[in-house]
Image: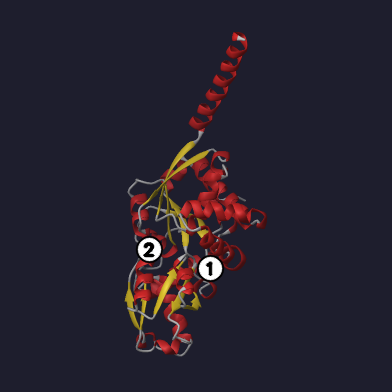
């Protein structure tokens, strides 16, 4: 009996040593992100399903609450990789930031313009208020363009600004505004209380993208394998999310990652997977989105036409 226990102890010891060795073999990556929202779904899946481990990497994600901060801290060396918006990334690179876009995660805007029940068309917003992120945000640019296409001058609608979706939702529900730009789950909550969707930004503004993945050229040259592993795991997670066979588990993972109610997570799944499909396969960076973003920012006077590469696709899965 003693011998049997001794052999069992040896086996368990070997297994434990193997687990420790495997953990030590994983390459750590410091990743700066904004917040644990639905757009981070591929990250939640890659973590829970072991795709990161399979790729030999262990990302340590730090949420900083602001897209500009992720890029600033990346350039400053605090992060190896950062997640930010396309326009923030282009601004940073064009203005001399030592960073480059290496992959795209969300290439459609998961946002809607929600309006109070009395608003039947954009014309009904004349003399009323809408709350948007900020004046030069590409979401605001897209809204203004759509309004003009409807034959309305955007100046006829009073625009106020707030960068936080929860605050914009509060402004709509309190009656401070009659229209608000909202993402999930706040657009669902607005619909549940009787508000309506006036414009699906993702379906309309197809020449713009939402979130992109950046890194520094010096880090990439020294850690190319880690960058490839990280992007490969996220791309695998995107494919997994889009597989209908994984629906129930995908919803459960989203609910845990975002702390959403499972019912809201289910509605997010149906919108993302069955309608919008915002995640980029293989994390490909659409050239049309980069060009449209640059052109818009140049027109706004935010940047001059960049004279350096904006993207480096050498680390993407093929």
* Nearest to the observer: residue 20 or residue 256: 256
Q: Position of residue 151 (x, y in %)?
A: 46, 90
Residue at the spot 33% in from the left edge and 54% down from the top edge: 72
Residue where numbered disc 1 is placed: 288
| Quarter assignment of residue 52 | top right
Q: Is residue 16 above or below residue 169?
A: above
Residue 216 badge = none
Q: Is residue 65 above or below residue 159?
A: above
Q: Answer whether labels 1 and 2 touch (C-beta < 8 Å).
A: no
* Nearest to the observer: residue 183 or residue 263: 263
* Nearest to the observer: residue 148 or residue 228: 148
Per the image, label 1 sits on a secondary structure element best described as: helix
Residue at the spot 45% in from the left edge and 76% down from the top edge: 113
- Callout 1: 10 Å neighbours few (<14), some, many (20+)? few
| Quarter assignment of residue 8 | top right
Q: Position of residue 278 (x, y in %)?
A: 55, 63
Q: Is residue 133 visible?
A: no
Residue at the spot 54% in from the left edge and 63% down from the top edge: 268
Q: Is residue 117 visible?
A: yes
Residue at the spot 47% in from the left edge and 40% down from the top edge: 223
Residue where numbered disc 2 is placed: 91
Side of 212 where 49 appears, left or right: right
Q: Position of residue 232 (x, y in %)?
A: 57, 47
Q: Is residue 78 above or below residue 202?
A: above
Q: Position of residue 217 (x, y in %)?
A: 43, 48
| Precedes in sequence: disc 1 or disc 2 | 2
- Callout 2: 10 Å neighbours few (<14), some, many (20+)? many
Q: Give the position of the N terminus as an image quadrant.
A: top right
User: In the displayed image of the protein, which residue is found farthest to the right?
Assistant: 245
């Amino acid at each position: 009996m003693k011998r049997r226990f001794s052999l069992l102890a040896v086996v368990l010891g070997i297994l434990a040593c193997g687990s420790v060795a495997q953990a030590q073999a994983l390459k750590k990556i410091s990743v700066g992100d904004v917040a644990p929202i639905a757009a981070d779904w591929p990250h939640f899946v890659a973590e829970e399903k072991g795709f990161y481990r399979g790729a030999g990497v262990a990302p340590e994600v730090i949420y900083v609450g602001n897209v500009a901060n992720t890029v600033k801290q990346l350039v400053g060396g605090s992060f190896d990789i950062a997640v930010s918006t396309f326009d923030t990334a282009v601004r940073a690179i064009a203005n001399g930031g030592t960073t480059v876009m290496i992959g795209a995660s969300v290439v459609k805007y998961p946002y809607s313009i929600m309006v109070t029940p009395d608003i039947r068309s954009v014309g009904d917003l004349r003399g009323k208020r809408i709350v948007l992120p900020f004046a030069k945000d590409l979401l605001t640019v897209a809204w203004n363009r759509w309004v003009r296409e409807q034959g309305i001058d955007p100046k006829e609608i009073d625009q106020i600004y707030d960068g936080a979706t929860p605050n914009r939702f509060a402004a709509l529900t309190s009656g401070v505004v009659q229209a608000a730009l909202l993402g999930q789950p706040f657009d669902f909550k607005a619909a549940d209380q009787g508000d309506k969707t006036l414009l699906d930004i993702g379906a309309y503004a197809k020449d713009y993208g939402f979130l992109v993945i950046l890194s520094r050229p010096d880090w990439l040259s020294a850690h190319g394998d880690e960058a490839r592993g990280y992007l490969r795991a996220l791309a695998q997670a995107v494919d997994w999310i889009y597989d209908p066979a994984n629906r129930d588990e995908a919803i459960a993972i989203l609910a845990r990652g975002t702390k959403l109610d499972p019912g809201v997570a289910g509605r997010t799944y149906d919108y993302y997977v069955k309608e919008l499909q915002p995640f980029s396969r293989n994390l490909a960076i659409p050239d049309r989105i980069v060009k449209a973003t640059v052109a818009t920012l140049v027109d706004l006077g935010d940047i001059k036409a960049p004279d350096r590469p904006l993207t480096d696709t050498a680390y993407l899965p093929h």
